[in-house]
Structures are given as C-alpha cells and as structure tokens.
Amino acid sequence: MRRFYWGLVLVPLAILAVLYLYPLGTVLWLSVTEPRPGLQNFARLTESAALQRILWNTARISIITTVVALIAGYAIAYALVHMQGTRRTIMLAGLLASFWLSVLIRSFAWLTLLQSRGVINSSLMGIGVIDAPLPLVRNEFGVILGMVHYMIPYAALPIFASMASMDQRLVPAARSLGAGGWQAFRRVFLPLSLPGVLSAAVLCFIFSLGFYVTPALLGGGRVIMVAEYIAVQIQETLNWGLGTMLATTLLLSVLLLLAAVSRLVDMRTLFGAK
Amino acid sequence: MRDPGLRGSAFSGWVVLLFLVLPIAVVVPVSFTPERFLSLPGATWSLRHYQALLDDPSWVEALRDSLIVALGATAVAVALGTAAAVGCWRISSRLSEFIRLVMLLPIIVPAVVHALGFYRAWVGFGLIDTHAGLIAAHAMKGMPYVLITVSAALADFDQRLEMAARSLGASPARAMRSVVLPAARPGILAGSAFAFVTSWDELVVTLFITGRGVITLPRRIWDGVQDNISPTVAAVATLLIGVTLLATLLLARRRG
C-alpha cells in the first residue's frame, strides 16, 4: 500500500519534471551554451557597466521597497492586533482585498493617479497650486510607490501572524512591573515580533527582485529592473545568451538568499507549507 | 485607562489602510468620466466606457479565454497538488519532504525566469499560443498553493484514522475517498481559490507563450495600457475590483 501513496507523489512529480523542471533547466543550460559553450555570458556581468547599472537599480529599488513596506506593514499589523470588533474587520478586509487584487489593476490605478494628465496633476493644476505637471511617474519614485503598495500586504500578513500568536499578556506584565509604554514595546513586543518581520523581509525582497509588471508600467522604459531587461533581451533583441544568463543570475540570487536565511527562518513556514 | 500609544498606532494603521485602498478606489469614478481620456468626472457621469466595453468583442473574448484557462488550470493544479499532498502526508519521510520542497519551486522562482523556460520548451512541444499550453503553465504555478493548503489541512489529521479504515477492509482508494479527502476538503477549497486567482491574474508567462490565439483578460488590459490608456480599462478595472471585493467578503464570512 505504500506503493499507492508513492504513486500519488510520483505522478505529480513526473508531470512537474516535464512541464516545469525541464523548462527551467533549459534556461540554466542555455545560459552556459548560447551562443557557444562557456562562461562568457557570465563574464559580461563584470565587464558591462550597463548590466551592472541594471542589477544595481534592481537591488536598490528592492531594498528601498522592502524597508518601506516593512515599516508600513508593521504599523498596520500592530494596529490590527490591538483592535477589536467592526474596526478590526474593516481593516482586515481592506488589507485582504488589496492583497487579492491583481497587480496589473493596481499599477493601472497608480498610472491613473500619477501621470502628467492624471488625477493628481490635473487636480493640483485645476486649483492653481502648480503650473506644470509634477513628474510623478516614469521615474524611480513612481516605481517604488507602486511596488511598496503591492508589497505592504505581503509584509503585513506574516508580521500580523507572528504578533497574533504572541502571548498578549506579556506587555501588560512588563507594564505592571514598571516599564513605560515605549520600553515595554522595545524590550518585549518588538523582539518577539522580529521572526515575523524577518519572514516578511525575505518574502518582500525576493518578490521585488523579480518584479516585472509594476516597473514596466510605472517606470515607462526609463527605470528598468532586471526582469524587464530580460524580457527585452528575449522578445526584442532575441539575445538568448544574455537573457538566460541574467535569468540564471536572478534565480541563483533568490535561492542563495533563501538558503542564507533558512538557518534563521523555517522555509516551510515562510511559504505557508507548515 | 486607554493607552495613548495604542491610539497613535491605530491612527498609523488607518493611514496605511488609506494608502492601500484610496489609490485603487480612484479608478471607480474615473471609469464614469464622460471624457475620452482618464479624468475624474465633473457634474455629469457617463456609462459610455461600459458601453464601449460591451461593444468591443475583444473584451468578451478575453473574459472567455481567461475563464477557460483559469478553470482548466485550477482543475489540473487541484488534482496534482492534492495527490502530492496526501502522498507526502502519509509517507512523511525525508525524501517526501524534499520532494515537497521541490514542488514549491514554481512560487519561489521569479516569473520571468520560468517564463523563458516555458517559452523555449513550449516551442518544442507545439504548445505555443494554445489554451492547453497556457493551462499547463498556469497549472504548474497553481499546484504549489494547493500542496500547501492541503498539507496544512491534513497536518492535524490523525494518520491512524486512515489505517483504521484500511484495517476494516477499505482499499487505499476507498480510504482516500471516504476518510482522507473529506478531511482535506477545506484545504482543497482554499487551494482552488489560490490556483484560480494565480491563473486569473497571471501576466508574465502569458506574455511569453501566447500570441494572437489566446488573449486573456490581463493580456488584453496590458495591451490596452500599452497603446493608449482609455477609460475603458478603468471600467474593466472597476468591474474586477467589484468581483475581488465580493469574493473577499464571501470568503471572510465563510471563515467567520
């Protein structure tokens, strides 16, 4: 009967191997064989200033996005655990609804607001605050705004889960022993919530690294992150060697990052598998 | 005595919520503008962009393609993910744990990376720009979510109940149907929701492996945003926001 259960595992695994692992392997393979075998594609990482600028853009935007999303996510998670009744339901529903809403719609909404004839600029010009439209989009500001907006629920939900599982009597206990509000937060609540913050940080950062839709729409071709650059290499210049090399680099960065934090965070809790 | 610090934290929580919700909400009035460009409606509100939506068959076709692909991908993802989760749950050895980790890859790997792989492989398989090809790719992306939610549903389920069913003479398949699957039901339902939404919203892989034959709603929106942004897209966005809101409320009510 063990054969029955192994069958249940091996059939999906075989299908995954053909329809997923093989395509993924193709990308890795092409990165060292296209146009000819060798590591010359990877050598370009050290030679090309343009590539380095794109990778640095990607890393910088991802770091800023992660930090801002963590702060905002922490604030809303903290408010949620200390709230009851209808207010809590409303806040949680708003957070979940924005979590479920498609990234494309959300980027489109920002575009509606931020473009030069968009809602913000035309309103400000209408009441005479500014004469010319502010450059709110097609720049790094717009990209980071859109990405932070997308990432806040991903940051807030793991933090909220770790705060909610905490013993809620600990802070009152610290207070009754004479700690001030800030002291009780900093010495008791904050350290206990850090595992959730770390999970959220990893999640936000690796998602940000591979972001495509938001930078493409809100960056408008001026702020290019690595995912969009890869897409251009394949779809427009047909440069498979360079495209797959960057894809491999992106994949390895994500996996190395996960391996590095796996000592601190249980991977299975990170992706909800436990 | 209410803590003043808590009032401050509630305030910052509401500020973050407004930041999340308001920019999205702006799309709704914009979709009722009488103008031909994106703008807030003044005194007169108009349904012309909703009318334009109905008049343009490409939107209805996109809705149809999205539904076909999302339902197909969900069915495949649920079948494979549930089977794998039940098998791993019952075997629970180091090897099966490792296999489960491998099966999570599609949600760890950045979308653009596997999009290149799908593109290349699908050319070989003859699956480019077909419904079957997109269903297969989306099913791979949805399967890990089903695996996760079904595993979570079974985590607290006593394996001895399945053994008891077997010792009473049930075949493995019968024990699976009558004992294990009912216990996994909440996980299967949650996993279906995740798999469906994953396919419904998916754009990056779709951009690589479809052409003119299959145009899903996200791709139609993407095309609409690329050439010139008309308020018709705002009308579509408004409808999708409504659906998402409704689904979230229904799910929240189910969970209590």
Image: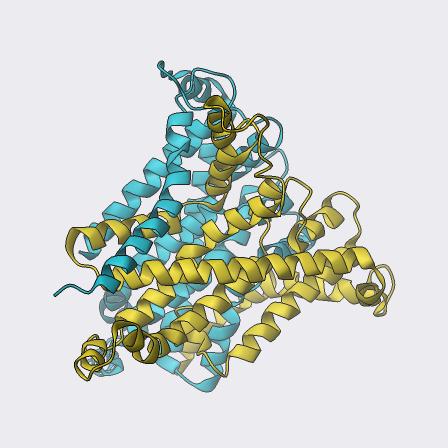
Chain colours: A yellow, B cyan
Q: Dividing the image into 4 quarters, which one contains the C terminus of chain B?
A: bottom left
In the rendered image, residue B144, in percent from the top left (x then y), is placed at 45, 64
Residue A110 in sight in this render = yes
Q: Nearer the viewer, residue A93 or A36?
A: A93
Left or right for A196, reference A216:
left
Q: Residue at x 26, y 69 (%)?
A: A164
Height in image: B131 above or below A50? above
Q: Nearer the viewer, residue B157 or A234?
A: A234
Q: Residue at x 55, y 45 (%)?
A: B203
The image quarter containing residue A38 is bottom right
Q: Residue at x 52, y 35 (%)?
A: A114
Left or right for B34, reference A252:
left
Q: Residue at x 60, y 50 (%)?
A: A212
In the rendered image, residue A200, in percent from the top left (x then y), is placed at 44, 67
In the rendered image, residue B253, in percent from the top left (x then y), is placed at 19, 50
In the rendered image, residue B16, in percent from the top left (x then y), is placed at 36, 51
Q: Nearer the viewer, residue B26 or A130?
A: A130
Height in image: A21 above or below A264? above
The image quarter containing residue A79 is bottom left
The image quarter containing residue B238 is top left
Q: Nearer the viewer, residue A147 or A244?
A: A147
Height in image: A142 above or below B156? above
Height in image: A139 above or below B230? below
